[in-house]
Image: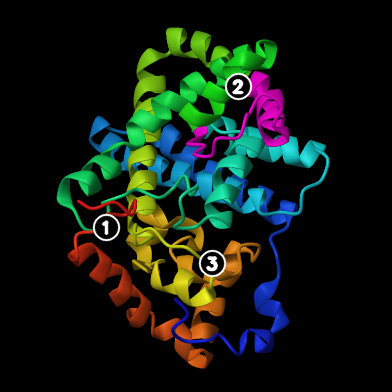
């Protein structure tokens, strides 16, 4: 499906291709936590009329923490360090994820974007109302499922026969590979006790301060899940593809720049510049707007995905579903 070749990618200024650094991600996570703590202080000391605003702002920062962890999963794999464990504590556990879980789930999306094994592919979500609505509303359900994941993972760590269910239920693994001794699954499982301990530590806090935990953490986390599910639907054309050619990635990926509302809630930390991210997954999130601008100014194929998109949409109009079966 190669409509327009990408001939100038080698000309991109190296400064735009700089990868994320763990130190920068820790600073970003701390900045998000500063906003969360300020909102919690406002909810504690201020009038209840401010609670809804604070809850939405906390949800936006929880969504942003997910983007920080997302950038971390694109870092070159290295043995865990104190800094990576701290980032996991700040940006992973509170949003129900570990770094290995994010890495296993998300990197399969990049390897198989739009193809049969893509765990993010939502058939029908781009062109049919009910599948799109259900996919957008499933965010809170996924949050609840990933609460369970930590404890199920601890069980699967002890009983290997549970590992296939662990990978397929919680990570959307679509291959027929036996996951019992899968190295990525093993890494995820070894990280799950920390996630489970985080939730167990939250229990006495919830018993002591139920209202604070409900309105300051649990409900904002559900809303963050809703923001995330909406973004996953919006950032791609959910039609089955067969290759990872740059022109195909451009045709099936969407960029969203919603200004302040996007930065606060729906597309935090430049994750809305999603076409540039898929073309260069390791590029740091702060570089994506400039990289997107470079492509728009210099690469015609970046601005002309309509040819491939029209082919994909013609398949839908002809009665072919995203799974390649007649509807």
Mark 2 and mark 1 lie on one chain; the one further toward the N terminus is 1
Question: How many residues crowd around disc 1 within 10 Å: few (fewer than 14), some, or many (20 or more)?
Answer: some
Q: Is residue 31 visible?
A: no
3 vs 1, front mark: 3
Q: CA distance from mark 3 to mark 2?
A: 29 Å
2 vs 1, front mark: 2
Per the rendered image, the range of residues in magenta is: 171-195
Q: CA distance from mark 3 to mark 1?
A: 19 Å
Question: Where 143 sits versus 293, above or below?
Answer: above
Question: How many residues crowd around disc 3 within 10 Å: few (fewer than 14), some, or many (20 or more)?
Answer: some
Mark 2 falls on what kind of element? helix
Q: CA distance from mark 2 to mark 1?
A: 32 Å
Residue 193: in magenta span: yes
Residue at 52%, 37% (x, y): give it: 173
Residue 194 falls in which quadrant of the image?
top right
Mark 3 falls on what kind of element? loop
Give residue 244's mark: 3
Name the spot of residue 200 as percent of width and height, x first: 56, 12
Q: How is the image coloured?
A: rainbow
Mark 3 and mark 1 lie on one chain; the one further toward the N terminus is 1
Residue at 61%, 12% (x, y): give it: 155
In the rendered image, which residue does mark 1 sit on? 126
Name the spot of residue 240 as percent of width and height, x first: 38, 58
In the rendered image, which residue does mark 2 sit on? 163
Residue at 28%, 32% (x, y): give it: 47
Whether label 2 touches label 1, CB < 8 Å: no
Q: Is 131 placed left or right of 90 in the picture?
A: left
Q: Nearer the viewer, residue 114 or 275?
A: 114
Mark 3 and mark 2 lie on one chain; the one further toward the N terminus is 2
């Amino acid at each position: 499906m190669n409509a327009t070749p990408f001939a100038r990618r080698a000309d991109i200024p190296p400064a735009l291709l700089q990868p994320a650094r763990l130190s920068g991600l820790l600073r970003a996570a701390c900045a998000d936590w500063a906003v969360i703590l300020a909102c919690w202080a406002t909810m504690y000391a201020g009038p209840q009329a401010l609670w809804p605003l604070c809850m939405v702002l906390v949800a936006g920062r929880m969504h942003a923490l997910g983007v920080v962890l997302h950038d971390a999963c694109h870092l070159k794999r290295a043995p865990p360090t104190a800094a990576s464990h701290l980032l996991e504590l700040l940006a992973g556990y509170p949003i129900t994820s570990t770094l290995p879980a994010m890495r296993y789930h998300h990197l399969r999306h990049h390897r198989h974007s739009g193809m049969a094994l893509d765990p993010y592919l939502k058939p029908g979500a781009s062109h049919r109302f009910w599948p799109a609505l259900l996919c957008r509303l499933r965010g809170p359900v996924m949050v609840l499922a990933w609460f369970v994941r930590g404890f199920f993972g601890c069980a699967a760590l002890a009983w290997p026969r549970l590992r296939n269910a662990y990978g397929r239920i919680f990570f959307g693994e679509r291959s027929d590979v036996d996951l019992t001794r899968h190295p990525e699954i093993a890494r995820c499982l070894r990280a799950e006790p920390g996630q489970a301990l985080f939730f167990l530590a939250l229990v006495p806090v919830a018993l002591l301060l139920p209202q604070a935990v409900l309105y300051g953490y649990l409900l904002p986390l559900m809303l963050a899940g809703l923001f995330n599910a909406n973004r996953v639907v919006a950032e791609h054309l959910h039609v089955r593809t067969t290759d990872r050619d740059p022109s195909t990635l451009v045709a099936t990926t969407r960029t969203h720049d919603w200004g302040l509302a996007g930065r606060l809630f729906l597309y935090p930390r430049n994750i809305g510049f999603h076409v540039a991210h898929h073309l260069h997954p390791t590029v740091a999130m702060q570089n994506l707007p400039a990289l997107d601008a470079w492509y728009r100014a210099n690469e015609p194929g970046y601005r002309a995905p309509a040819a491939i998109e029209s082919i994909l949409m013609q398949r839908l109009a002809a009665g072919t579903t995203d799974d390649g079966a007649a509807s």
